[in-house]
Amino acid sequence: MVTHLRGHTIGFVFQDHHLISAFTALENVMMPLLADRGFPGPEITARALDLMAQVELEKVSGNLAMNMSGGQQQRVAIARALAMNPDLVLADEPTGNLDTKSADSVFELMRKVNRESGTTFLMVTHNLDLARRCDRIIDVVDGRITAPGSGEAARAPS
């Protein structure tokens, strides 16, 4: 039951993308669909290609993951997280290993997916500039949520 819930309603994006480096970007995006259905089919390939287009990587879908930039790999990880149409994507420092330009691109992609599909992203970040761009901020100090609303103070310009 928990595995089904996790596989169908929650997607995961990690700080380190956890792609299979010897597989192509497209094959990495197909993995959750293959794990769910057990066999490849034209609908799985079509879904994965559509997701590659959504993350603006359709032209490099045949590239091996190990030959892609960090930003491209993180976009593939986001596409993979969206493969099962989850309601929620948990993102742990999804831009932490990226340069500023790639981080901005990945964050904008998550915002776009949120706006267009309604998928909720719950993101953990230490980057206050990034956090200020989110709809809601919840501060956690020593494993505890701080006073309600205190996260709003983090939105104020430095």
Image (cartoon, grey):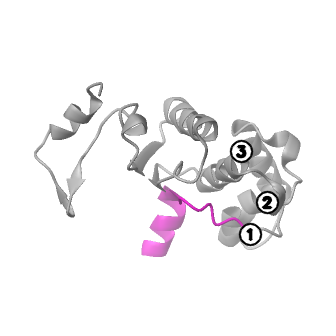
Q: Give the residues in magenta.
A: 1-19
Q: Position of residue 126 (x, y in %)?
A: 38, 49
What residue is disc 1 on? Answer: 20
Q: Position of residue 17 (x, y in %)?
A: 62, 60
- Asked which secondary structure carries label 2, the reply is helix
On the rendered image, what quadrant is the C terminus found in? top left
Q: Given contact means CB atoms under 8 Å apart, are the residues at marks 3 and 1 in contact?
A: no
Is residue 67 within the magenta segment? Answer: no
Q: Which mark sits nearer the N-terminus, 3 or 1?
A: 1
What residue is disc 3 on? Answer: 51
Q: Position of residue 75 (x, y in %)?
A: 67, 47
What residue is disc 2 on? Answer: 65
Q: Residues within 10 Å of mark 3 (few under 14, many from 20)?
A: many
Q: Position of residue 2 (x, y in %)?
A: 42, 73
Mark 2: amino acid: Ala
Q: Which mark sits nearer the N-terminus, 2 or 1?
A: 1
Q: Nearer the viewer, mark 2 or mark 3?
A: 2
Mark 3: amino acid: Leu
- Asked which secondary structure carries label 3, the reply is helix
On the rendered image, what quadrant is the N terminus found in? bottom left
Q: Given contact means CB atoms under 8 Å apart, are the residues at marks 2 and 3 in contact?
A: no
Measured in 3D between alpha carbons, the distance from the residue under mark 2 to the one under mark 1, in whole angstroms, is 7 Å
Is residue 18 within the magenta segment? Answer: yes
Measured in 3D between alpha carbons, the distance from the residue under mark 2 to the one under mark 3, in whole angstroms, is 16 Å
Q: What label does residue 88 carry, if any? A: none
In the image, residue 106 sits, relative to residue 142, either above or below, namely: above
Q: Which mark sits nearer the N-terminus, 2 or 3?
A: 3
